[in-house]
Image (spheres, rainbow, N blue to C red):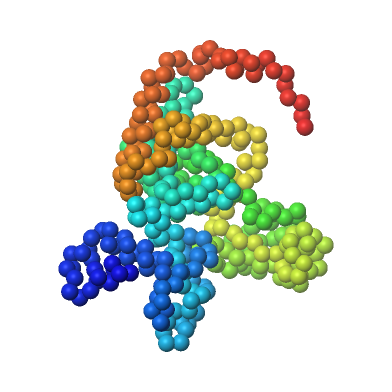
Amino acid sequence: MTILRAVYAADAPPRLRRLPKVQILRQVWVQQYWTDQDGTLGWRGPKSTRDRQSRRTKQRRSVTAPAAGGRPDPSLAQVPWSGMEIVTPHDAEARYCHKAGKAEWIGYRDHQSETCEANGPNVIVHVAIRPVPEQDIDAVDAIHAALIAQGLAPAEHVVDGGYVTPDVIHHAAARWGIFLLGPVRSEPRPRPGFTKEDFHIDWQARTLTCPRGITRPPWKPTFDGDRPRFSVLFPRKACRACEDRLACTGNIDGKGRHVTLLPRPQQEIQTRVRAEQQTQQWRARYAIRAGCEATVSETVHAHGLRHCRYLGLAMTHVQHVLTVAGTNIIRLSQYDTPRSKRPATPFQRLCNRLPPASPN
């Protein structure tokens, strides 16, 4: 605070305030501390909710009128979203990320795209570095635009569940002509009774009929963030009289079943993919993506991809491009025989001699 007061004093040279390190110091102090009406510094409280793109332009629901004298309520003095919070003065662009039950780190998020041909070496053709608070699905559109600009647009792009929603599948096909293959998330609260796919949708009449024949009056448009949705709430009276109410609604207070529908193209995609991904044919088709985890392991453990040698997102991107270029050179130099003609390794021969596993 002594440094900041001196730099921002009226008689201080203005150029000092524009120094990058002074600006970082100022931002860190504002993000971590606040001054009460007595001039005492206090820690800002931790974030009460997770960072989401849709929340960054909206006011917190918990924000109320300021306390007396126009000062902020101490209970509302919280650190900013992780997309804005500076967590290390050594790299002002690095951000904190936490995947529940998996990992946490300070830095960036890396997205790699590689070929997956049956014969021939697989090479990494694109690398995207994004801030870690940005979710995987937010990077898909930029990845497709870059691949098309390089003349490398895939007919089918195989990704994991973090990159897939019905909206993203529909957008990739409509805008880029790319089919996105990946698992769509199941219902967030699975019920032992009826799922959304068991209901009959009449798109012309804008009605939804449950498996027991109860038809809900025309649904109401709503939004999930900035995405249009349809809210369908079945009459409480009808649901109370249904013998399947507990299994269907999942509640004991007598409320009716609530179903959220996507716009028709996305809803049809969700219904179709949820059914397909339960089949053995879909799982065999999706198994081609298994090599992606090996690529991550190769670039991380063999070539130190997760250790940033530079500061800032732009220079980190350069490092990752050079890393995957070196990875491709090693792969191409070691490739000599198509996989179908390669001799079996000792480990493969051992596995072939093992008796088949008995079912559990």
In the rendered view, does 298 fall on the left or right side of 248? left
In this view, the residue farthest toward the bottom is: 69
Residue 148: tell me if it is visible: no
Residue 28, located in which quarter of the rendered image?
A: bottom left
Residue in the picture at 77% in, 29% down: 359
In the rendered view, does 279 fall on the left or right side of 358? left
Residue 320: tell me if it is visible: yes
Q: For this rendering, which residue is in front, 178 or 143?
A: 143
Q: Whole-percent x and y of residue 349? A: 61, 14
Residue 41, located in which quarter of the rendered image?
A: bottom left
Q: For this rendering, which residue is in front, 220 or 292?
A: 292
Residue in the picture at 40% in, 40% down: 307
In the displayed structure, 228 sits above or below 101; it is below
Considering the image in quadrants, where does the N terminus appear?
A: bottom left
Q: Whole-percent x and y of residue 252? A: 77, 67
Q: Whole-percent x and y of residue 121? A: 43, 23
In the rendered view, does 339 fall on the left or right side of 311? right
In this view, the residue farthest toward the front is: 2
Considering the image in quadrants, where does the C terminus appear?
A: top right
In the displayed structure, 96 sits above or below 41; it is above
Q: Whole-percent x and y of residue 345? A: 55, 15
Residue in the picture at 61% in, 35% down: 283
